[in-house]
Image (spheres, helix red, strand yellow):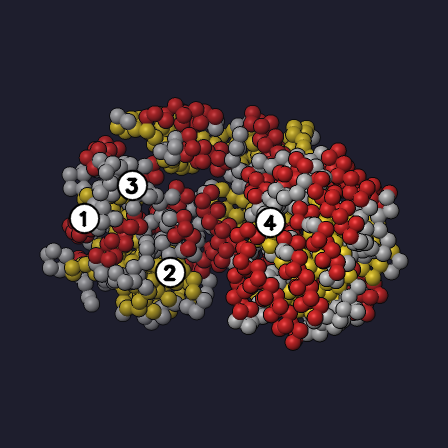
Amino acid sequence: MKIKAIYVHLPFCLAKCNYCDFNSYPLPAQNRRVEDYLACLAKELELAAGEVCLDEITTLYLGGGTPTVLTSEQLVSLAKTIYSYLDSTKVIEATIEANPGTLSIEKLTALKSAGFNRLSLGIQSLNDALLKDMGRIHDAKTALSAFNMARKVGWGNINVDLIYGLPGQTIDTWLDTLNGVIRLEPEHIAVYGLSLDDLTPWGSQKLAGSLNLPDESQALQMYESAKDILQGQGYIHYEISNYSLPQRGSQHNLVYWTNNYYIGIGSGAGSYFSGKRYYNVRGLDNYIFQLEKGLRPIDEIIDLTIEDEMAETMFMGLRLMEGVNIAEFHDRFGVSPIKKYAGAMERLASYDLLVVEKGNIKLTEKGIPLGNVVFQEFV
Amino acid sequence: MSIPQERIRNFCIIAHIDHGKSTLADRILQFTGAVSERDMSEQLLDQMDLERERGITIKLQAVRMVYKAKDGQEYLLNLIDTPGHVDFTYEVSRSLAACEGALLVVDAAQGIEAQTLANVYLALEHDLEIIPVINKIDLPSAEPERVKEEIEEIIGLDTSDAVLTSAKTGQGTEQILEAIIRKIPHPAGKKENPLQALIFDSLYDSYKGAIPFIRIMEGSARKGMKIKMMATNKQFEVNEVGVFTPAMRIVEELNPGEVGFLTASIKNVKDTQVGDTITDALKPAAAPLPGYRKVTSMVYCGLYPVDSEDYEDLKEALEKLQLNDAALKFEPETSVALGFGFRCGFLGLLHMEIIQERLEREFKLNLLATAPSVIYEVYKSDGTMVRIDNPANLPPINEVEEIREPFVKATIMVPNEYVGAVMELCQDKRGEYETMEYLSPNRAMLTYYLPLAEIIYDFFDMLKSRTRGYASLDYELHGYKGTDLVKMDVLVNGQIVDALSFIVHREKSYYRGQNIARKLKDLIPRHLFEIPIQAAIGSKVIARTNVKALRKNVIDKCYGGDITRKKKLLEKQKEGKKRMKQIGNVEIPQEAFMAVLSLDED
């Protein structure tokens, strides 16, 4: 299999949000490290290109952190470096993540001409009180105007990230946000339920019992109402948390979910190729230290067995509403998943969580919010 | 090295937990040079990891030392360690039988505690010479004179030459050794007599077989000799005899008064019964030595493998533990809910916890333990009586005339200001007041008759919390008494889970039923369907609650950077399930089976 996707990580943001457990550092404290880091990304790309083939890559994703806290010059230069290792004629999708509070007409124009054709906007909510509680740097008005700016400059493929299940959030405020976003007519909407790592500020408050989270049935109601409304507006629910207009699914993320090969560049980034998973060192200093010594910044290599790859193909693939294609699985591993996982499938089917339909194994409506119960059976 | 019998002293140390026994033992070992400064690891006698962690002695150990006394002579001292916890009275009794004297160690600030007192009485029963040692005199709160008075008052021991020590600083160690030599009689016994060796402990070694730890009372033991176990009549040939230095070291022979071990290719540990007498097969002794206080299992519980395929492993592990722990009893039993397992008898709750922990830790077993139970005497209407150690086996109530439960005589020592709280607690636990004595102007000793079932439920924890840890407790089995008991069944998803049944006094049944239902609700994870939980006496449901159905459990985000992390999360969830027992459609975690026991928080 060929490497189909490249991810580049920029671990900088303006300020950490209260729920964020990503590998990211507030920029004001790290400003002088940015140039060092960018130089290291170039070095890592150089090392990677010497070892693996990057010619068949079809998607690029620049994520973070908040990539757009960097200057237009920095980002354009980075894009140029990345593209110099790729066959740009093969790249069909190039996404950059952006925080609405970090965009300008100038930056949006520059990014577009640098080769990005998809914008992923972290709007999260259109309720100012909630945005403030989350520690976001923007308000609803900024979010809306950022979106409109992008459209004006000609971005034709925009994703909006939203979060439900926030402390203090009600069904009504959630529906307001959802409807507000639908009015923008983005091509893609990602709807995430809030999940909290213990080490985040909100996570520790949750542990202490001092966070006023919606209960499970409210969260479920938010999830279901989002699904109903979005589907009513022509959005296709194609992955547990992702909706898109027809043909606008994230090609990059589909590489992950179909368990194809990808390469990740930057601190903490993950790669999957040659039957192995690689995880880069986290932490700016570690990452820079390794590359300045001319070493690949790899922290962990996991040599997957066929069994592992099959399991991962199942639990990643089941995230997609169309599920895992039985024939494709068979072509790849030489065994039918129906046979391989007969016991698990029978159990799950008896609970009405899993179904085989048109040559695919997929979650049922009931199985979607209970995905982990299903995934567990395959790992 | 040959030291005549007149210069042998065998002794043990009696002390309450925390009164400094292990530290004192370490000082003695250092002083006599049995252990060099360099080899000294903290508290040498407590060899088991668990003992170190809990700071208690469970398994007794023996050490041999040579001490050059002030009179210029060398003396051979054998220190036999004793456990200090109420559960292990039996073990104490074993070490006492191998000694002529005992050091009674009392904390200079705290005074005598109930357990110390019980052990002193045991020692007196064995006619041991007792040397009072007042420890921790370096503490600012030390009151050695008051403690001396207490000892005289309560035990009636002369404390005029009590030794004042600080095991921490080493002060007084030499005086202790001198007192041992001066006051403890040397062992009696003649080398010419037929061998009589008391087995006070044993160890199983996979190469050498069962190794009895012995105290020679009469005669001698040496390599090549044919020996006979007087209880079983089995005969063996001695391969080697040795002593504890504290490491096991081979010697030529063991003579009267000496403490050591022998190996004789004894395959079956049952042939080295603790308390048995070893004699010379060719020249046997006329009678065995008197045994000592018999082991009584006070507490029973069911132990089941989570994975039924581990049954044989559990059996083997129990057998192995039994090799070195004669007090552990077990026999196979089956439970509708849990399948094949063992009903195990223990000396007490601590003993039970330790065995469970060792099974899990040393044998890597994944276990389910049912709530502990006492033995009930059930008198049936047909005039017969059955003894029930598992509530699930209670005969149908219409066949039951009367249920009797074991009562203990409990001795509680407590500072005056807590007397009221203790009496209230005893009352609440169905206790019957017997006496109260003042030990000193500010300490009292209360005696109550209490149902053993209440003691193993939460009595000790509550006693500690209501007296800020100042109370000490000792108890002994007193007898059986008929009380108004009922059997509580627990239904999970409409099905009786036999392993959750328990017997409870009628007056407390409503409260306990509510309590267990609530606890199970918190412990049983949510399933894909709602699970009703009920507590019932016969067909009458007295508590009911539901575990709500699980509706949302899904990883929302999964992209290229965290596939392995998310997979591990799923594996962890799956692993958690494996540790549960599937009963019908419901997976019940291990802790649920102990929920009957856990403390009431509110």
Query: How many C-alpha atoms fall within 10 Å of the one at disc 2: few (<14), some, or many (≥20)?
Result: many
Q: Mark 2: which amino acid?
A: Pro
Marks 1, 4: nearer the viewer: 4
Q: Nearer the viewer, residue B524 or B376?
A: B524
Q: Is residue A344 left or right of residue B62?
A: right
Q: Nearer the viewer, residue B164 or B324?
A: B164
Callouts 2 and 4 on one subunit:
no
Chain letter of the residue carrying label 1: B
Q: Mark 3: which amino acid?
A: Val
Q: Is residue B237 above or below residue B456?
A: below
Residue B120: numbered disc = 3
The kind of secondary structure element at disc 4 is loop
Query: How many C-alpha atoms fall within 10 Å of the one at disc 1: few (<14), some, or many (≥20)?
Result: some
Chain letter of the residue carrying label 2: B
As measured in the structure, the alpha-carbon distance from the residue carrying label 2 to the one carrying label 3 is: 26 Å
- Which tag, 1 or 2, sits closer to the chain's start? 1
What residue is rendered at 66% in x and 64% in y?
A77
- Which tag, 1 or 3, sits closer to the chain's start? 3
Residue A238: x and y in percent read 81, 52
Q: Which residue is mark 2?
A: B212
Q: Which residue is mark 4?
A: A14
As measured in the structure, the alpha-carbon distance from the residue carrying label 4 to the one carrying label 3 is: 72 Å
Q: Nearer the viewer, residue A361 or B95?
A: A361
Q: Which residue is mark 1?
A: B172
Circles 1 and 2, Cβ within 8 Å, touching? The answer is: no
Q: Nearer the viewer, residue B420 or A170?
A: A170
Q: Is residue A275 above or below residue B544?
A: below
